[in-house]
Amino acid sequence: MNNLSIGIMQGRILPKFIDRLQVFPINTWREEFSVAKDIGFQHVELLWDGEQDIKNAKGLTCFMSETPHLHTPSICVDSICSCTSLQGMLNEIIDVIDTFKENTPSILVIPLLGEATINTTHKLKEFIDEVNTHNIKNLLQTYNVKLALELDMHPSKIIEAMESTDLEFIGICLDSGNLWHYSATPIQDIRTLSKKIIHVHIKDRDLSGDNVLLGDGIVDFRTFFEVLKDIEYSGLMTLETKYFKNPLDEVKKNFKYISKIVQ
């Protein structure tokens, strides 16, 4: 599986706050790119957080195009988790594309969690139908962008909703930690979703559901990657790991651990 690109979420190496996740590293984003490259990461997943601080990162767009050795092929639109309406979710997606335009990362990770939770076939169909009939569809096609939905619902319900529309620009973001925490049959779930998986988030959880260093929790990463290989997944893998006391040391440990298994 050496063709897989291993990346890191923005703000996980040089975080703005040690006690908060999903915060754009507004003061250290340039340095974080350099450190990520030195560690061995092949890409950085941009973070559109609730404060939309990424809009204030002067020079980021130019930096993205001038740094071919460390790609930015995806962005996590985490602000959607705070949306309480479907229109609000759509507006966030439009805002991202309007901000980056031709530099929009090819994959927008859409976490339909938190306030924006979608966990029924009906609601997921409604979301997909709105995207399909909204101006967003034209924007996605114009800039060759796909939406990778992160969901907490049974795989069979996801497939039922997605097969009814079968849009090429909508797929699934698979999260290893969430999968092992919420599902009694994670391997079977991967196989069920296999044709829809277009992005992967890597993290680990313990029995209580707390995030831990990779390898310290309940995720069977060896089997996880064997199944990904079996279904011929060849896309991105982004570490969405938690930091505790020393983010830099901890992310190095996580990268070393996952690199050995993927080889």
Image: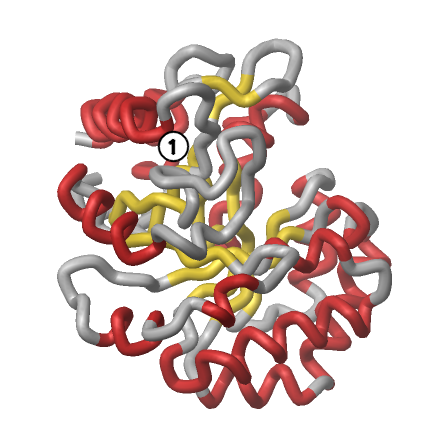
Residue flagged by tag 1: what amino acid is it?
Answer: Val
Residue under the image location 54 percent in, 84 percent down: 98
Q: Position of residue 122 (x, y in %)?
A: 85, 58
Eyeballing the image, is 49 above or below 40?
Answer: below
Q: How many marks?
A: 1
Q: Residue furthest front?
A: 27
Judged from the image, the secondary structure of the residue bearing numbered disc 1 is helix
Q: Quadrant of residue 170?
A: bottom right
Which of the image's four quarters has the N terminus? top left
Q: Which residue is mark 1?
A: 227
Q: Between residues 121 and 11, which one lies in front from this camera angle?
A: 11
Q: Position of residue 228 (x, y in %)?
A: 37, 38
The colour scheme is secondary structure
Residue under the image location 21 percent in, 30 percent down: 259
Q: Position of residue 193 (x, y in %)?
A: 55, 45
Q: Between residues 115 and 60, which one lies in front from this camera angle?
A: 60
Evaluate whether residue 118 shows in this view.
no
Q: Is residue 169 left or right of residue 182?
A: left
Residue under the image location 25 percent in, 27 percent down: 252
Q: Is residue 112 left or right of residue 196?
A: right
Evaluate whether residue 134 shows in this view.
yes
